[in-house]
Every structure is written in structure tokens, then in C-alpha cells.
Image (cartoon, grey):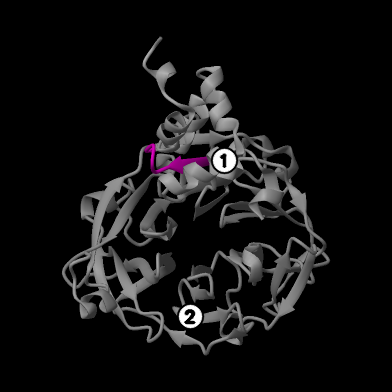
Amino acid sequence: MTPWSRLSWDIVELILSYLPLRSVVVAGAVCKQWRAVIADPGFAVRAATSLPRRPWFFLYGQNNVVLRKNQAFGFDPDAGEWIALPPSPSVLHVDCFAGAGGFFFATTSATRFCYAPLLRGPWRETSPLFFSRCNPLVGVFSADGGRRHFIVVGGARFIGGLVDIEDPLAVEIYDPASNSWELCPPLPPDFRTGNSSQWLSAALLGGRFFFVFGIYSCSVAAFDLSRRAWTGVQTLRPPGVLFCFLLACNDRLILAGLCNAPDGPPCFALWAVDHTTMDFAEIAVMPRDLLSCLFDTDDDDNKFASLKCVGLDGRVYVFNEDHHKAYPACVCEISEDSSAGVAEAASGLNLSCSWRKVPPLPSPVDRFHKVIAFCSPVPVNSVLGGGVDREL
């Protein structure tokens, strides 16, 4: 008998539960015993609790001319590798594509909204939205009883095939259990000039507040998911900032953006934000050699326009959405110093940041007219089995 064959079922299950998610899938093809362990419904529960799994970085490229050139990729930080995701026929003709909270989202016509667990179908279509959308902000939160709900905020509205610039900035919440939408108070009028995800970023904090932030205007407001009400609009603009993105990092907000440096070319910096007072403190600056590796031009007036940023739970990804280097990216890992004092923790000065390059996308990589990126956890159930119903 080999050493593995002498191990009990519980020990094998425990060992396999510590593998990165992709390795778990591969291990299921090694032998009948491992396949039986991984296929057991209890294994997904064990794997979800044994090892804290970091959220994945997803990049979806759209080609407006040749739909078969649409591509999707997912970066597994636990394995340090990209995977090319197979295209889904049900979402080839999409008006917009997004992801959050363990789900892909897509709109395929004026009011059709679809969702599917990450990395695994099936796709499901919801009842019609109250308002048609293009590029809305999307979030996933737990309602009473722990069941997931989807919130859809803003997004350009189409009337007769044309974009309606007088969009009411609608906010809708979807309950999968009843397949119904709830119309909520709209975005404050301050966000009217840019009401889609191209101009806004969002951060879900503590499962209670859905923050909306203007990438260029630096206006910020929060939607209280329990009271269904918006807070007042404030301005969150560090000195010299040109544009920035708001992200959720565990129980705090992080602002990440490009700003003018007093002693040189623009730099990319991170700030910790107190969500109660909107006070901020700089915590990191991307090394210049990493920032320069995202570009191959000396045209300082235009080269930074394609810089984008997404992040979640202590990982901030900065990438170039232009094709010239096949969409290169860097990542900053944020960790907390447990020995820091209360004052340092409140200001964000207890945070340490480590920067590095992300491996290149797996070839071949086509040229895209539009790139959508997001960070999301990948629930073990969505990969090993269970489908939509178990995810909700």
C-alpha cells in the first residue's frame, strides 16, 4: 500500500482543502478516491473554511467588430497564475458585462439582466429592470436571512437606441428568491454628469454601505442598504490628484489614483480613508519602475489616460487597458500591523504595502475596444458544484 492509500478519508479531505482552487479541480482527476472526496458536498464547506482564499482579478475584453474575439481571463492570486475563461454563447451579444460578489453580470438588451456564478453556469435571466442600463455599477450583499441580493446603480439609459442624458440615476435591488426588483431612491444629482461605471467606481463596505465615487469629480456618497437611503454628497480629493478609484479593503476604504508629484512626474498613490469622517492618509506610492513598465511611450500628456484600478480585501490591481503591452498589470498587497496603536489603526498608518508585477496574460491576446475588470471572491461551491441556487 502507498502512504496515500493508508490515510483516512478525513485526512485526505483536510489536505486537499488547503490546495489553491485550480489545484483542487486538477486533484479531482488524479484517482477515484480523490474524485470522491472532492465531489462530496461536505468538501466544499471544508475547503471554504480551511484556507482564506484571496479574491481573483478578472479581465474581460470586448471586440465590437468580431464577437468571437471577445476574451475573458481570471487571475488566481493563490496560484499566481492566469486562466483563460471559455466564452459563453449566452453572453456574446452583451451591452455590458460586470462582476462582483462571486457572480458575473450582463445585460443583453434594453432591460434584460443576467447573472451566473463565477467560473460555472448556468446563466439566468431576471425579470425586467425598471430602467434600461448600460455600464451600471453592480454589487452583491447579504440581506435578512443571509440570502444574497444584487444592487444595480446608475448606468446610461437607452431610449429608442439612443443614450438618454436625462437619466434619473436609478437604483434597483434584485431579490433572486422572488425574482423581483425594488426601485430605490436614485443617485444624488451630483452624479448626473457621469452616471456609469466608466465615470464612477463603487465599494461595498461591511455589507451595509454601498459607496459611489466619481473617478474625476471626486464626489462620494453612500447608500445605506438597510435604510435604503443615501448620505449627503462629499468631496474626497487628495492634493494634486488627477483621477482616482474607491476600493473596499476589509473594513476600510482605500483610495487609489494618479496625482501630480511635487518633485517629478505623476505618481500612483494609495490613501486609507475613514468612512465616517472621510479623512484620508497616504499609505503607499507605486515604485516608479513598476509604473513605467505599464507604458511604452514618453507622451506624458496621454499615456496615463488608459490607467485603471480595481481591488478588494487587501489587494489593489493597477492595469493598462490599452493593447500595446497586452494589458499589463501590477498588484499591491495591503496588510495590517497588529502591534500598531489605536490611533495608527484609525488613520491607516498601521498598513504596510508590497508591490509587484502580475504575470502576463496567457497568449494569444486579441485587441479589444473595451476592457472590463473587477475583483471578486470565487466561492468554492461555484466551482465544485451547487450551481446558482446553492450560491444564493
Is 75 a magenta residue? yes
Number of numbered labels in the structure image: 2
Which quadrant, please, contains the N terminus? top left
Residue 220 numbered tag: 2
Query: Under tag 1, what secondary structure?
Result: helix
SS at mark 2?
strand
Say whether residue 178 is left or right of residue 367.
right
Rendered view: 288 above or below 226: above
Instruction: Sort mark 2 into few (<14), some (14-19) or many (20+) by Cα contacts within 10 Å.
Output: many
Hey, what amino acid is under mark 1? Gly
Figure quadrant of residue 101: bottom right
Magenta range:
72-80
Front residue (pair 73, 321): 73
- Identify the disc placed on residue 42: 1
127 with respect to 83 (left or right): right
Q: Residues within 10 Å of mark 1 (few under 14, many from 20)?
A: few
Residue 368 is at least partly visible in this image: no
Which quadrant is the C terminus positioned in?
bottom right
Residue at position x 57%, y 40% in the image: 42
Q: Position of residue 182 (x, y in %)?
A: 75, 74
Residue 193 in view: yes
How far is disc 2 from disc 1 in space, using C-alphas?
42 Å
The picture places residue 339, in percent across and down from the top left corner, at: 18, 67
Corner quadrant of residue 276: bottom left
Which quarter of the picture shows residue 277?
Answer: bottom left
Foreground disc of the pair 2, 1? 1
**Of callouts 2 and 1, which one flags the residue occurring earlier in the amino acid sequence?**
1
Residue at the far bottom: name it: 232
What's the amino acid at mark 2?
Val
- Name which residue lies at 56% across and 18% down: 32
